[in-house]
Amino acid sequence: MKDKILGLVLLLCSLSVLAEGTAQSIFSSQRSQVYQIRVIDIASADKFSIGSGFLVSPQGHIATNFHVVSSYVHEPDKYKLELVNEQGDSQPIKLLAIDVIHDLAITQAEGMQGQGLQLSPQLLKNGDRIFSMGNPHDLGMTVIEGTYNGFVQHVRHQQILFSGSLNAGMSGGPAFNAAGQVIGVNVSTGGEQISFLVPVTFLATLLQQAKSAQLEEGFEKVIGDALLADQEKFYSEMTDKAVEREKLEEYSVPVNLADSLKCWGHTEDNDKTLYIGIHQHCRSEDRIFVSNQLYAGHFSYNYEWMETDQLNTLQFYNAVEQRFNHAKLASSYDEEEVSNFSCHSDRLDIQGQHWKVSSCLRAYLKYPGLYDASFVMASLEHKDKALVVKVGATTISKANAAKLMNYMMENVQWKP
Amino acid sequence: MEALIIQLGGKHHKLAEVFRSSDETIAVGRAYNNQLVLADPYIAPQQAQFYYKDSGWRLRILDQANRVLHNGKVIEQEELAVQAGDSLTLGRTELRIYSEDYPVEETRQLLVSRWLHSNSVGFLAPLLALVIMLLTGMCSYYLEDSAEFEWKYYSYFAMAMAGFAMLWAGGWALASRLLRHQHHYGQHLLVTACALTISEVSNIVPSYFGFMFSSAAVAYYLLLLVSFVLFAFMLRYHLFFATNIKRPLRVGFIISGVLTFSISGLYGLMNEASVNDKIYSDDLQPGFMYPVGSTSVDGFMSDWGEAMQELDEMAGERRLEELNENN
């Protein structure tokens, strides 16, 4: 028995020594190819924001996050990009390619030493140790150890769930497997010990693109095109797939519009409000960083069933009127980015039932073809019960906004 | 000889001082040896003289220190003929010349209901109107807004409304006291309470029309129109009691128009500043309250397409503007 305990203790000690050794060895072997990326404000010649990056090719290609270099992308006259190497020397870098959807960017520096870190698209097993490097809060290059926990569920864009603590400034740094190969890029955090990595496959694609093609048009066009393509994929998948319906009291409503949505429900049934309200909300919780003023790719829908046996018709419709408003869009509030909302409302006859429908759109000025759309419809058919449907989508094309409206008007049906 | 009548101060709502000639001459000036003494420091002690000659009255200017005006024009010659209806300005004093047979304007009609115009309508009628106003407000609140029972807040609101009505009427009573020497508080309160009662009832109309036309703009402009007319009529009665203005309804419409226009203009400017406001029709009524058929889905989509086409044009213009600015 004693031997067994001793054996176990020894095993644990050796494991921890091994683990420490791995973090240490990864740090010492890869440190020279991991850098701090700085966005320099040209007027003050001082750093405006910081992040991390790493060498991915012998030609001096350096990977980082799009959000690290986004200030430069949007205002290239105001900022410039620099890297700071292990010795503390800084040198200018040039931005070659961006992937705004997955938050990646490839830059290039001249005269870089090193072969570049090896990228490994091989999948890990949940619970595998992984190591992430970066320069948090400009404190110095750091390695942190955590656990690989597979891909994040219910998101529009694949990310690795990393149980470890990333901090501001580590964005764009590499995450390694135990063999010291890059499996992902640090990107964001979602709370204590919850961090997210961009899978390295997206980086490999972007690197190929950066190596093969010269960017002909401005980055603005690249961002606009990427957002257009991304929304096209998301909404055509949604409207093309077979409609799943569920009963919400006396209506049948489409549900599970996309796997990437998170859904919640609640019921309002207190003495103060004299009606019952049953709510179902679904929304996409990941968002695409475009700039500090603009997060793209939000989508939400919301069903609300209202019923009363205590209010008269006028009172009830007044209560419905209070609920008949447009969904809040998690989007830009910067007047420079968007036009004013333009709305159209009418009373409709949909499948023999009276509805009130209102739909608003506003255009993105920098990204032609992209809009924020908001849609709300309420049934006017019954004296004491009503259904209110709300849909909100940011950075969507006009055609898809129309498609989405048609989809809702077709698929919300009265089935008592 | 026809008597000359000189009226000091031309406004019909003030008690005018009237001087009637008893002789063939009337000396006018600041000195006390004149027949008509005018205590105006801009008038000379011996300023002018009216005299009767060849069956007409004439005016002779005796002092040219300050020019005398005849019907608003400077008198260049030393003397001139005057007739009934003329006005003369001496110093800063205005005189009007009349004869005995000068026609006076028609007698104006009092309000239809005499009791409204009597000096005091008493205590009961305004109080009753105030109570009716609060009850009407309460009824419309109950019918329309009571998805949640918050009578406590409504009673606070009602008290504030009553307080406001009483203060508003008080302001007008003060004006009446100053301008017509009678406060007419009861009448002012009655008018205020009636106007507020009608507004409680009539405010439902715009939102119903907003629903019928599915347009926030229709509801908004109709509400403006209703408020404009109601306020004009309220002002008409306030002005009637407080002043002797000849056409109180016209003045009421002008004031109400200016106020409605400027307030809605300010509101519009404030709205313009916020791009996140979605301006859409949020009036809902049960379907059976709409007399005409509804739009089809295809019809809605094509209207929507047209509306959004305009949005694209606006966005395009803004893009061009920004492009030009950057260049």
Image: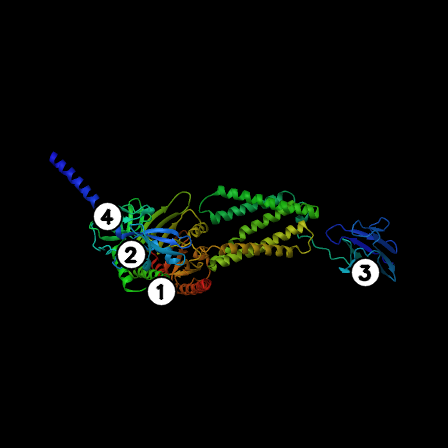
Q: Mark 4 vs mark 1: give the one in front.
A: 4
Between residues B115 and B57, which one lies in front from this camera angle? B57
Count of number-bearing discs? 4
Whether residue B231 appears in this view of the structure is: yes
Secondary structure under tag 1 reads loop
Secondary structure under tag 4 reads helix
- Residue assigned mark 2: A62
- Residue assigned mark 3: B83
**Amino acid under disc 4:** Ser
- Residue assigned mark 1: A217
The residue located at (51%, 46%) in the rendering is: B138
Where is residue B142 shown, x and y percent of the image? 48, 47
Q: Chain of mark 2?
A: A
Between residues A137 and B309, which one lies in front from this camera angle? A137
Could you give the CA–CA distance between mark 3 and mark 4, rounded to whole angstroms? 116 Å
Whether residue A289 appears in this view of the structure is: no
Q: Mark 3 vs mark 2: give the one in front.
A: 2
* Circles 3 and 1: CB atoms closer than 8 Å: no
**Local crowd at mark 2 within 10 Å, few (<14), some, or many (≥20)?**
many
Could you give the CA–CA distance between mark 3 and mark 2, rounded to whole angstroms? 103 Å
> What scheme was used to colour the molecule?
rainbow
Q: Which mark is residue A28?
A: 4
